[in-house]
Image (cartoon, rainbow, N blue to C red):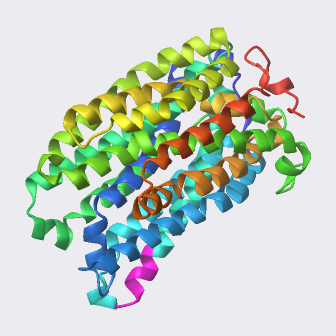
Amino acid sequence: MSTTDDITPASVLSRGDRRRALLGTGLGNALEWFDWNIYAVFSVALAGSFFADGEGSSGLLHILLVFAIGFFFRPLGGLVLAAAVDRIGRRRGLALMVGLMALGCLLVAAAPSYEQIGIGAPIILVVARVTQGLSAGGEFAAASTYLAEVAPPGKRGLYSSVFYISTAVGTILAVATSLVLHSALTSEQLAAWGWRIPFLLGAVLGVVALWIRVGLVESQVFSAIENAPKASLFDGIRRYPKASLQVFGMTAGITIWYYVFAVYLPVNAKADEPSIESRIDVASIAALVVFCAVLPLFGRASDRFGRRLWMLLFCGVATVSAVPLMSAFTPTVGSVLLVQTLGLLVFAFYGSIAPTLMSEMFPTEVRAAGIGMPYALAVAVFGGTSPYVLEWLDDIGRRGLFSWYMAALCLVSLLVSLTLIDRRDDDLRDLGPVR
């Protein structure tokens, strides 16, 4: 439990405590997305090291299967680990999440190859990705509740923007690491040992983030109820089904939009035009930098105009722009820069408010659990399957339908968002549930 000295009202936190709270939350979240993208970028090298048939397409399919397994465990992390955050506290929960993520990175970095230990190699890889999937499932809930609860009065939206700023920073760091390694090492060196470097870097960053998070100040909002009876594992869903369904419904459109415009577009362009791969990476980094720049502006504005309006703006614009934006995309540097930037600017309406929006929907005793399970489940169902849906539609000659599928999910999120209540002026300590 936190000591009395650890319990500090958000309104009187010192500048150092606030900086540490934002840094600790952001660094751990950046690590998640750094690892996410590194795994995808070096998937071919991973296949060659961890599977007997790694040189062929079947080895790559095995790596993608392990990738999907990590997605499968996110809802379990959103259920079990997010509920733990409501029991042990936000500070300890954040430390637990980043510790698991760092452990997964270290396991991958240090794992022997298939040539050295046979079937044990892919088993270690699966264990690492399961660990990271559990961590990722609980991270959003833990970080969201903490950011909302430590924010000063009237600045929850501004603090909320840190979550997706750190997400974008993690992606930028992954792309930059890939650029450096591909420039500094030969293909043979990358395949033999170079791919271990980013995972080792992830483990080191994880240890730093763990050290910072262990020293965080506990939120007063949680401290006010930490001696009260603890909610059970499914209380968030059982007691507050409307709010849980709202989180799931909102996330359906959110998650597919983000994965397409933040992750998929540059990957697709590089697959079609490998000769300009580095230039596409630079264009993608530029789009992500613009995204980072506008997030705090949008977050601060939401403290004045409300989270509900921002959510409706994202869903409405996304619904009507999904088809034209995807139709305008071509595998060129200019197209990646323009389309990805526009897509991320649309997403910024949601990305700037995500943690606070959902934290304002649940009372303190089930806040993390209420967010964690429905959010992670929607991400797994809609975000995790989006590459497969796209490839399936491409195989049957209906690739163009994918943008309509995106628009339909964003429309679902729009209809759900119409039922939201604006709670930007409410005190989180006195917040009742959405029923």
* Pick the front one: 71 or 100: 71
Asked whether residue 285 is in view, the answer is no
Q: Position of residue 98 (x, y in %)?
A: 52, 51
Most extreme residue toward the top is 304
Q: Main secondary structure of the magenta part?
A: helix
* Pick the front one: 425 or 64: 64
Name the residue at 64% across, 8% down.
304
Asked whether residue 59 is in view, the answer is yes
Name the residue at 42% across, 74% down.
125
* Pick the front one: 357 or 65: 65
* Pick the front one: 148 or 356: 356
Q: Position of residue 149 (x, y in %)?
A: 69, 28
Q: Position of residue 369 (x, y in %)?
A: 75, 48
Name the residue at 8% across, 63% down.
186
The vertical placement of 388 against 236, above or below, is below
Magenta residues (range): 118-125
Left or right, 378 with respect to 225, comes to left
Residue 246 belongs to the span the image colors magenta: no
Most extreme residue toward the front is 397
Q: Which quarter shows the C terminus? A: top right
Q: Position of residue 178 (x, y in %)?
A: 22, 51
Left or right, 8 with respect to 255, comes to right
Most extreme residue toward the bottom is 118
The vertical placement of 260 against 306, above or below, is below
